[in-house]
Image: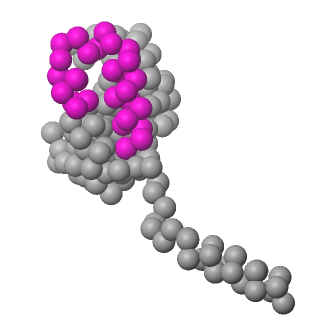
């Protein structure tokens, strides 16, 4: 009987002490917004591109936002800038990933993000089939966007060697 009462007491104690608050994912949206604003302020400084630590902070924060804040469209501007930084510092895969999040947001920066994805894959990845997919998706989703003409031009030269481009340019003169 003693063991039975002790077991009930232990179980009741565990239930009573249980924390009923939802488990935190470790991601605080408001804190992320403050941090994004701080990093944007650092981005605007003239010297930030020489500071590898700031570059990595910006990119890592952007990747964390990409993974955790997919429903908040206010991060579009920051993620666009972070993608540009990643591309310009030799991290095109991260740039494409970050811009993919912006495309998924369907915010005002989505068309440019989709364009940059295709252009980066075309120029840095040299994957013409994948670049074509992004360019065609851009034209399908944003046919009247100011970048549409440039995307059509890029599709026209996609996969052509520099020699072929020179020949076609000379031929059209």
The residue drawn where x is 34% and y is 28% is 58
Closer to us: 162 or 39: 39
The residue drawn where x is 69% and y is 81% is 9
Asked if one can make out residue 136 in the rendered structure from this viewpoint, the answer is: no
In the image, the segment drawn in magenta is: 38-65
Closer to us: 43 or 10: 10
Closer to us: 140 or 46: 46
Find residue 135 and report its horizontal and vertical position in percent: 35, 40
Quadrant of the rendered image containing residue 95: top left
Find residue 31 and report its horizontal and vertical position in percent: 29, 45
Asked if one can make out residue 124 in the rendered structure from this viewpoint, the answer is: yes
The residue drawn where x is 76% and y is 86% is 5
Quadrant of the rendered image containing residue 14: bottom right
> Does residue 55 appear left or right of residue 93 in this picture?
left
Closer to us: 7 or 77: 7
56 to 78, vertically: above or below: above
Q: Could you tell me which quadrant the C terminus lies in?
A: top left
Q: Could you tell me which quadrant the N terminus lies in?
A: bottom right
Q: Is residue 53 magenta?
A: yes
């Amino acid at each position: 009987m003693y063991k039975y009462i002790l077991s009930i007491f232990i179980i009741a104690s565990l239930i009573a002490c249980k924390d009923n608050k939802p488990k935190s994912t470790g991601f605080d949206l408001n804190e992320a917004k403050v941090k994004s604003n701080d990093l944007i302020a650092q981005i605007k400084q003239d010297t930030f591109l020489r500071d590898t630590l700031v570059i990595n902070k910006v990119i890592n924060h952007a990747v964390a936002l990409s993974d955790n804040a997919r429903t908040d469209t206010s991060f579009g501007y920051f993620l666009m800038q972070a993608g540009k930084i990643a591309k310009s510092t030799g991290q095109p895969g991260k740039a494409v990933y970050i811009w993919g999040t912006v495309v998924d947001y369907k915010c005002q920066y989505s068309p440019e993000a989709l364009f940059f994805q295709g252009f980066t894959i075309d120029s840095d990845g040299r994957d013409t089939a994948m670049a074509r997919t992004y360019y065609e998706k851009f034209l399908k989703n944003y046919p009247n966007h100011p970048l549409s003409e440039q995307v059509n031009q890029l599709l026209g030269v996609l996969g052509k060697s520099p020699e072929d481009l020179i020949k076609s340019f000379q031929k059209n003169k």
